[in-house]
Image (cartoon, grey):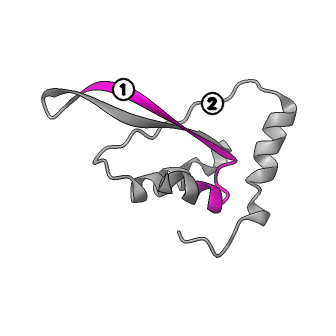
Amino acid sequence: MRIADELLASRLAACVQVLPIRSIYTWKGKTVREGETLMLIKAKASDFESIKETILKLHDYEVPEVISLAIDQGSEVYLRWITEVTHTDSRNLNSPK
């Protein structure tokens, strides 16, 4: 949860949804089956690099999944809310980076 807390505190994300999932993947030549946590981060595309840096700094995986999915369409009110909540001028400048 510290990643979600940091993204919200630094105003890089408007919302972070945290979901428990079961993953099956290949790692270092072996099939791994384990529980993981999926985070859906609601944010502006322009903040992706800062979000990625934050995740890579705080995540304990050697290769965490950090991808961006573009929003082609959405509720104007919802998209405006994301922009307002993550507005650069209102970021908490005292938040650790």
Q: Which residue is mark 1?
A: 22
In the depicted structure, whether residue 70 falls above or below residue 83 = above
Task: Tell me the SS state at disc 1.
Answer: strand
Crowd class of label 1 (few under 14; some 14 to 19; many from 20; radius 10 Å)? few
Mark 2 burial class by Cα count in 10 Å: few <14, some 14-19, many 20+: few
User: Residue shown at 36%/26% (left/top)?
Assistant: 22
Reply yes or no: does residue 47 show up in magenta. Answer: no
Residue 97 pos. (x, y %): 53, 69
Expressed as whole percent of the image width and height from the top left, the position of residue 31 reads 18, 24
At 72% from the left edge and 65% from the top edge, which residue is drawn? 91
Q: CA distance from mark 1 to mark 2?
A: 24 Å
Which residue position holds label 2? 70
Which residues lie in the magenta part?
7-25
- Looking at the image, do the residues carrying marks 1 and 2 touch, with CB atoms under 8 Å apart? no
Secondary structure under tag 2 reads loop
On screen, residue 16 versus residue 2, left or right, reads right
Residue 25 quadrant: top left
Q: Residue at x 54, y 36 (%)?
A: 68
- Residue depth check, mark 1 versus mark 2: number of the one nearer the observer: 1
Amino acid carrying mark 1 in the image: Arg
Q: Could you tell me residue 6's position as x and y percent?
A: 56, 59
User: Number of numbered discs present?
Assistant: 2
Residue drawn 49% across and 50% down? 52
Residue ranking furthest to the left: 29
Amino acid found under the numbered disc labelled 2: Ala
The stretch drawn in magenta includes residue 21 = yes
Closer to the camera in the image, 72 or 22: 22
